[in-house]
Amino acid sequence: MELFATVHVAFITSLLFSVFKLIMCQDQVTTPGTVFVTEGEIATFYCRFDPSNLVALDWKKGEDVNTAVSLIRLFKTRTIRGDDLRVDMTRNYSLTINETTQADSGVYWCQVTLQGVFESSTNLTVSPGKKKLVYI
């Protein structure tokens, strides 16, 4: 009976720890709510999380994280880039978009795989740049 009680207590403790960890991890990924830039400027989005258990990180663009297009992905130590050469990821996992255009406006997702998958979104607004006059 004593062995059963010990195993039962160990199981309950392990279960409670797992639930606590899951609840605490819900806010483990943070990004800025909104980023405003003018056309032609560089847009930078940070993605803050504890990287100690990082398996993968995926920066995506789209209204819904499940259907968003992957821009750049880090899997363990390998970076997989999309087609847009203006997009890059810094060593601290921030996303940068060089020479922004109004077409870059939209929702960007930082999706992180740790001991579960967590994501946070940022809305980018690119306002029109000033028109340059060309004299002939």
Image (tube, helix red, strand yellow):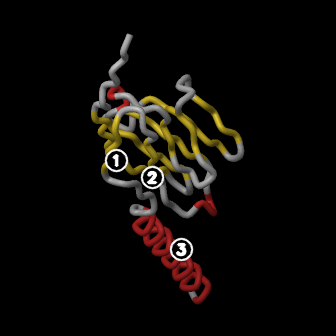
For the residues labelled 2 and 1, the Cα–Cα distance comes to: 21 Å
Q: Residue furthest right?
A: 77
| Type of the residue with mark 1 | Val
Residue 128 higher or lower than 9, as above or below: above
Q: Which mark is residue 118?
A: 2
Secondary structure at badge 3 equals: helix
Residue shown at the point (30%, 39%) measured from the top left: 125
Q: Nearer the viewer, residue 91 or 7?
A: 91
User: Which residue occupies the foreground of this view, 75 or 123?
Assistant: 123
What is the x, y in percent for residue 131?
30, 25
Residue 122 to residue 104: above or below: below
Query: Mark 2 or 3 closer to N-term?
Result: 3
Q: Is residue 126 above or below residue 82?
A: below
N-terminal of the pair, mark 2 or mark 1, is: 1
Give the left or right position of residue 13, taking residue 132 as reference. Answer: right
Q: Nearer the viewer, mark 3 or mark 1?
A: 1
Q: In this view of the protein, which residue sits in the foreground, 134 or 131?
A: 134
Q: Residue at x 48, y 50 (%)?
A: 117
Give the residue pinned by disc 1. Answer: 35
> What residue lies at 35% left-to-right and 42% top-to-bottom?
37
User: What amino acid does circle 3 point to?
Assistant: Ser
The correct choice, above or below, for 131 with respect to 60 in the image is above
Image coordinates for residue 126, horizontal then vertical, percent: 32, 36
Residue 14 numbered tag: 3
Q: Which residue is farthest top?
A: 136
Q: Which mark is residue 128?
A: none
Left or right of residue 14, residue 55 in this image: right
Q: Residues within 10 Å of mark 2 (few under 14, many from 20)?
A: some
Residue 94, given in percent of the width and then of the height, sits at: 52, 49
Residue at mark 2 to residue at mark 3: CA–CA distance: 22 Å
As helix, strand or loop, the secondary structure at mark 2 comes to strand
Badges 2 and 3: C-beta atoms under 8 Å apart? no
